[in-house]
Image (spheres, grey):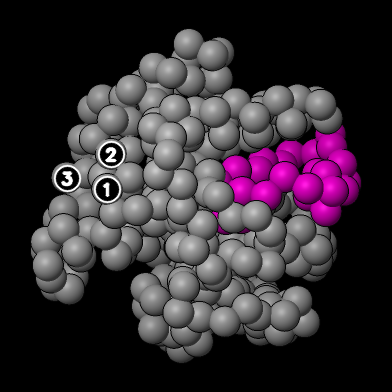
Amino acid sequence: MNFDQYKSLGVINRTPDSFSDKGRSLNQKHFEEQLTSFLADKSVICDFGFESTAPMNSFVPLDEEVARFRDFLDASRDYNFQGRMVSFDTYKPQSFLMMSEMFGALHDDARFIFNDVSGVLDDKLKSALLSFKGKKFAYIYTFSHIPSRQQVQEHMKFLDESTDIVTATADAFDKAYNWFKEFGMEDQLLFDAGFGFSKTYEQNWALINRYSELEGELLARGLRNPHVIGLSKKSFLKKALNTTDPVVLEELHKKLIQKIQSETKLKLLFRVHDPKIL
């Protein structure tokens, strides 16, 4: 998969309890404006989510997540995705398979990304991956300490402060790379450090400030896969500035993006709620 033309994953959450937009994307007018804007920019990959994984929210069963997806499909069926990559943000392999199949039936030239926030490498994922073998497909591996997919919303209960965060992240990416290599799909893998997921406030900032060090560690191991970086609307940014002012927080977000861009050479995709920040 070639990501040269892309700069960002533009987030559209079709959930009633999204921490980022408070369900605004369920409003058809707002959704249409957002999707039209994203599709007008060929550097944006649309990243659709149908379940909030914020710690204050509850687990959403498969049938409810798919029902939300069907509503989205009805709302977006008249849009031309022009062979663009489409990302589905879910930690359930079965959900991803159903979503990609239904979306592909309407848009047969679509290419899919499984944006899996769980970081769990298991038989369910293996089965889903093998069904996409040989197809234009990519998978985003998110580093976390979550032991099972059913515990994603509880990710802040699973912290590990015993290991240096840069080393731990590099080790996790190395493990994921070799796991994918068993199926010959290592080139379809993207790395996401998982900012805000099962990490302390200090670990999140350490990763930001030492991202070039992480890159160096990965390059030393021969790992050159693209990276996804999601800092947009993260709570640790609010804590750092002790504010909820969206303008102030977005300015900090922009500065952090520029910092990481200036210090790294690997391909970076920024997961953002407003792609115009790039």
| Region rendered in magenta | 115-142
Residue 226, x across and y down, in percent: 51, 31
The amino acid at mark 1 is Glu
Categorize mark 1 by other alpha carbons within 10 Å: few (<14), some (14-19), many (20+).
few
Three-letter code for the amino acid on which mark 2 is drawn:
Ala
- Determine if residue 196 is in view: yes
- Residue 38: within the magenta? no
Compared with 237, 76 (above or below) is: below
Q: Position of residue 245 (x, y in %)?
A: 14, 72
Residue 202: numbered disc: 1
**Earlier sequence position, callout 2 versus callout 3:** 2
Pointer 2 and pointer 1: residues touching (CB < 8 Å)?
yes
Residue 206 tag number: 2
In the rendered view, does 167 fall on the left or right side of 239? right
Label at residue 255: 3
Viewer-nearest residue: 2 or 174: 174
Circle 2 — which element?
helix
Residue at coordinates 57% horizontally, 34% vertically from top-left? 172
Q: Nearer the viewer, mark 2 or mark 3?
A: 2
Q: Dot 1 lies on which element?
A: helix
The type of residue carrying mark 3 is: Lys
